[in-house]
Amino acid sequence: MTPSPMTQRVSRVRSFVTDDRTGGVMLMVAAAVALVLANSPWRDAYAELSSYVVGPSALHLDLSLATWAADGVLAVFFFVVGLELKHEIVAGSLRNPREAAVPVIAAVGGMAVPALLYVGVVLALGDGAALHGWAIPAATDIAFAVAVLAVFGRGLPVALRVFLLTLAVVDDLLAIVVIALFYSADLQPLWLLPALALVALFGWLARRRTPPWWLMVPVALAAWVAVHESGVHATVAGVLLGLVVPALARHGEAHGRAHSFADGVNPWSSGVALPVFAFFAAGVTVVDDGGPLRVLGEPVALAVMAGLVLGKVTGVLTTTALITRWTPFRLPQGIGVRDLLPVGFLCGIGFTVALLISELSFDDELLISEGKAGVLTASLLCAVLGALLLRWDARRARSRDMNRDGIDDGDLPLL
């Protein structure tokens, strides 16, 4: 049966919005618009829009639009992250510990070294009050990183994308743990009980032969409210809801529910949630009475830039070199250590989670602006360096045993 013209148009729009490159472009456009507004004669109007309060005060949900973007809208993105984590752990690249070992350990090194470098820089510059922002340069933005790889990685093995995705997914998991443990305030443990009960109910509903969306959506919203009231950052609710969705095929389905749910929600995440968050989070005023780009010379901005630009690539390369040198673990077939140089810079594209942690780290608006300015500058620099190095890597001749495991790599699919 031939699909109707309307169905075909919807399918084309869905494919366009969920394409790796499209998601990255939409993020960049939203961030660029925010930066222009925040540094234009309309900056006061932009600030007023960001601080405009909506929501029921009886439920403690009378929040500014910027807070709704960070706590509410971004939870959709974290729900997709949770679904991807569940799929990778149960049926994907994290299922086999031996194959996942290198990108997992590289992710740990890629978070630890930037955090240590941040601490070192702020202490060296005498700004000990800024230490709470140590996790800002630790996170990688999956959407941006994969978008740059999709555009500039043509001719490189597909295994490189799988490696980057695995590393970024583990990076996101660790970032979620960091947010839950270190960036949640005024904890109300009693609210966690109904939150976990609602998450469990959502998981049970997701396992029904026909998932009742009319009931699952309000249950998910109620779980989000409970997590928000508990003091744990509300985006964690999205991850928990994603993790309880089954990843293996059930009831004769072709794919697991985690995969099909991600397909359904991803257009909303890529096309709405991330651009909206970027619009409200990236509006940093870098031109003020202190002169153009003054904030980039402040300790927090310098520490964030050092962590993302230098710390990420150093952490990824060093830990990978050590584990492949001193253990039996090896990189996937077709990938060499040289391929990790551009990957290291792609991991320095912090953006979404880094901007979120910037907001959670400080109460001082000036420090928040410094952190965000550092994230945006470093992410742009890492994107440019990663793109240039991907093209350099793609033009160089490749051996038949790039990972040096003594096994011919064979003819591998390319990006």
Image (spheres, grey):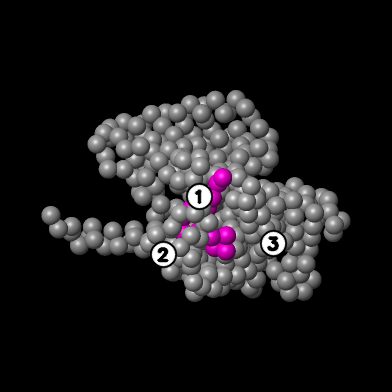
Return the mark for residue 310.
3
Residue labelled with disc 2: 415
Between the C-alphas of marks 1 and 2, the distance is 17 Å
Tell me the quarter of the image containing the C terminus. Answer: bottom left
Compared to residue 193, the image places residue 394 above or below, namely: below
Residue 102 sits inside the magenta stretch: no
Dividing the picture into quarters, in which one does residue 288 lie?
bottom right
Q: x and y percent of residue 364 in the render?
A: 75, 53
Q: Earlier in the sequence, mark 1 or mark 2?
A: 1
How far apart, in angstroms, are the residues tagged by discs 3 and 1?
Answer: 21 Å
Q: Which residues are magenta?
A: 328-340
Of the image marks 3 and 1, the number of the one nearer the N terminus? 1
Indicate which label's residue lies in the foreground, 2 or 3: 2
Please tell me which residue is depicted at 53% across the width and 56% down the height of the picture: 404
Mark 3: amino acid: Leu
Could you tell me which quadrant the N terminus lies in? Answer: bottom left
Q: Nearer the viewer, residue 102 or 383?
A: 102
**Where does residue 232 sit, x and y in percent of width and height?**
61, 37
Which element carries disc 2, helix, strand or loop?
loop
Res. 83 visible in picture: no
Type of amino acid at the residue the image marks with label 1: Thr
- Of mark 2 and mark 3, the one earlier in the sequence is 3
Q: Nearer the viewer, residue 185 or 263?
A: 263
Residue 306: x and y in percent read 72, 61
Residue name at image x 49 percent, y 45 percent: 99
